[in-house]
Image (cartoon, rainbow, N blue to C red):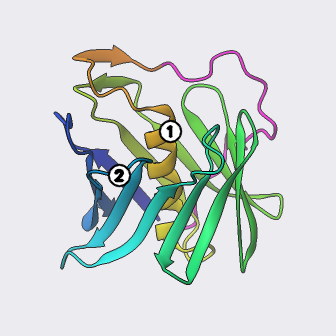
Amino acid sequence: MRIEIQQKKFNFIQKKYNVKINGQLKYQAKSKLLTFYPKIGIYNLENKELLSVEKKSENIIGLNYSLKFNENSYVDIYTDSRISFSIRNSKGTVHFYEQKNNAIGIFLAEKQMGLIDKNKKVSFGADLYSIDLEKGIVDEIIIIGFVLAYDCQYNNDKSAFLNYDWGNVDIKPVKEIDPNWRANK
């Protein structure tokens, strides 16, 4: 499965994103206005909110967000280290490990199940994330929620006309990705 999350340009007041699954527009996301901590809603094409990505107020350092489906159903994103994050759900713990050059490996039970790649050239604050993901292992909207939280926390440069984001060029990843990994179609 291929997921593309494209942030719209000129997002000075409100961040907006288009989310395509295998080339077809499936979701739209936008930041919620007048909130103290960052919140982003993910909506289907009928404008029904499916997920709310909300920064936790008790731990503002790091990538500590809640992905809320409704008032009683949510999963949390935890910061495990400066370059690794996790989400615990019914399938187990999904781990996200930053790699060199704007890549993030996605693992479940020590098995690579996905790869997130972010564009290096960014104009007018328009980030682009490409995600290759094994279909049916983890709900796609959880991965989308993680990427939006990550973008909100670490790539919040909306004032730049043009910049280059080289990513983590000198880190040693907690867990290395398989360079030959490909998602099953």
Q: Residue at x 64, y 39 (%)?
A: 62
Q: Residue at x 46, y 69 (%)?
A: 141
Residue with the mark numbered 2: 35
User: Is residue 62 among what the camera can see?
Assistant: yes
Q: Secondary structure at mark 1?
A: helix
**Disc marking residue 104:** none
Left or right, 147 with reference to 31: right
User: Is residue 22 among what the camera can see?
Assistant: no
Give the mark nearest the N terminus, 1 or 2: 2
Residue with the mark numbered 1: 153
Query: Hey, what amino acid is under mark 2?
Result: Thr
Left or right, 70 with reference to 115: left
Judge whether residue 165 is colored magenta.
no
Query: Hey, what amino acid is under mark 1?
Result: Gln
- Residue 133: quarter of image: bottom right
Identify the magenta region: 166-185
Q: Main secondary structure of the magenta part?
A: loop
Q: What count of labels does the image hold?
A: 2
Q: What is the crowding at mark 1: few (fewer than 14 residues within 10 Å), some, or many (at least 20)?
A: some
- Residue 137: quarter of image: bottom right
Q: What is the crowding at mark 2: few (fewer than 14 residues within 10 Å), some, or many (at least 20)?
A: few
